[in-house]
Image: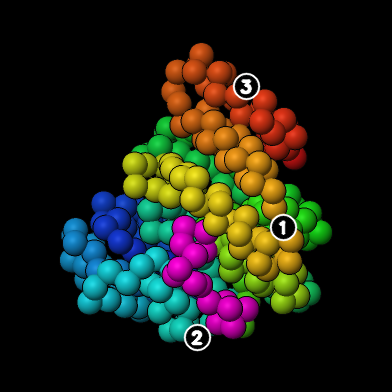
Amino acid sequence: MNEQSCDVSIVCANYNNGKYLHEFISSVINSTFLPKELIIVDDGSTDESKEILQTYKLPYLKVIGLGRNEGFANALNHGINEATSKYILRVDPDDILDKKRIEKQFMFLESNCGIDLIGSNVVYFNENLFNVVGSSNFPEEGPDIYKRYVNGEHGLLHGTVMGKSTFFKKHLYRQNNVPAEDYDIFSRMMEDGAKAQNSLEKLTFVRIHVNSVSNSLPFSTVKMTYQLRDEIFKSKTPFVKIIINYLSLRYYRKFYFEKQLLKRVVFLGISSAFRPDKVIRKFFG
């Protein structure tokens, strides 16, 4: 087992992800750098999650059990408030860390004191790592990341971020903005002067399954994202733009998760018709 530890608190919220916990925790254990803390907030799970977590006797594992389901953002805030490290790493307990993610992001932030948040790209997979469905293509540089948020889009992928604890503790998540809580918190950080960058490497494996947020996108989420954009960046988004972006995203996700080649081509074509610039950017940066 690796004994190299670093000043990082991993914070994740778990709700009924018991079947994935062993794989997730194993990816932490097998990392080239170990965290100071692995904080898992169990948000009132009704599956075997609690029993599984009790089987681990890791010195850096902290399990916070909530008596009832308080919601994703509230659960994360419990973990953030408990964290004592210089940096907080966000990941979800149904995902898998690349063995060098902690090391690479920690060393980057230590070597670049002017950067407050570091994200990365990901590999999307369906149930197991032998069934890869695609990967992300996020911008590397800070100005491009900031521009994404000003435009009502994501410049960082939530579960890939390691950042200074001071920013997470100052801003926290807002439960009433779920499921757009990630856009909300990072936009507020940006407006508060946080500097971000992405590694072009794929340092997290994101699992796509029936209960994953990545697998669904209701119109209300897109609408809320633009409402937050208008509130935070003092702008006004035309309703037609919200509809166009929603339809583009909806069919792009259909393309991503469809297995039949012909349907994938059709869905990608429809998505491109609504936002050709965005689809081109997805593939070519």
For the question of whether residue 195 can be seen, the reply is yes
Tag in front: 1 or 2: 1
Q: Is the magenta stretch mostly helix, strand or loop?
A: helix
According to the picture, the residue beneath numbered tag 3 turns out to be: 269
Decide: marks 1, 2 in contact (CB < 8 A)?
no
Of callouts 1 and 2, the N-terminal one = 2
According to the picture, the residue beneath numbered tag 2 turns out to be: 84
Residue type beneath disc 1: Lys
Of callouts 3 and 1, the N-terminal one = 1
Quarter of image, res 192: bottom right
- 25 or 49: which is nearer to us? 49
Q: Position of residue 247 (x, y in %)?
A: 57, 35
According to the picture, the residue beneath numbered tag 1 turns out to be: 236
- 110 or 264: which is nearer to us? 264
- Write the residue at 51% across / 14% down: 262
Alpha-carbon span between mark 3 and mark 1: 29 Å
